[in-house]
Amino acid sequence: MKGLIQIYCGDGKGKTTAAIGQAVRSAGAGLSVIFSRFLKTEDSGELAILKEVPGITMVPCRKSFGFFFQMTEAEKQEAAQVYQEVLDRAVSLASEAAGEGDTLLVMDEIIATYRYGLVDREKLTAFLRDKPENLEVVMTGRDPAQELVSLADYVSEIKKIKHPFDRGICARRGIEF
């Protein structure tokens, strides 16, 4: 398989859901899947089931920091270290798996992590430019930087038309997380 780069972006609900669907489809077709998350807590409902799917390897994030705009400078520095570790681990596992066969790497919310400077931007773009031939990459998040869009083969925008949050309805377990 020739691996390509996919971006699911926009302000609508469904970016992570699309990435999870791609991960399940790929695992079902026999690909190795490496699934990593950034800027999110580790208590989302999908994690419990993804851990049980043969062929999917989850890259845990050892700490959650909440919303970027609520972080102190010290928390931003710590978050950058933690998220870089997650990125390095995910890239290492994906590259290793790609050496053995077709592989999918999901980096959920890497786009915002990149935008906020919480990962080494040059390191990520260099990896995307030089990734293994048989490695498919999925990235999610809002407002992708132009350099990420330029590297991508697919860019799908999920646009919010209406959302319950606008009426004060908070995220619901099993639906939004």
Image (cartoon, rainbow, N blue to C red):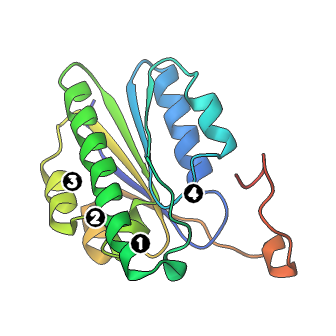
Q: Residue at x 58, y 21 (%)?
A: 52
Dot 4 corresponds to which residue? 15
Real-space Cα separation, disc 1 to disc 4, in angstroms: 26 Å
Mark 1 vs 3: CB contact within 8 A:
no
Depicted 112 relative to depicted 166: above or below: above
Real-space Cα separation, disc 2 to disc 3, in angstroms: 14 Å
The answer to whether 40 appears left or right of 130 in the picture is right
Dot 2 corresponds to which residue? 119
Sequence-first disc among 4 and 3: 4
Dot 3 corresponds to which residue? 128
**Label 2 is placed on what type of residue?**
Val
Sequence-first disc among 1 and 4: 4
| Marks 1, 3: nearer the viewer | 1
The answer to whether 46 appears left or right of 139 in the picture is right
Asked whether residue 77 is in view, the answer is: yes
What label does residue 75 carry, if any? 1
| Marks 1, 2: nearer the viewer | 1
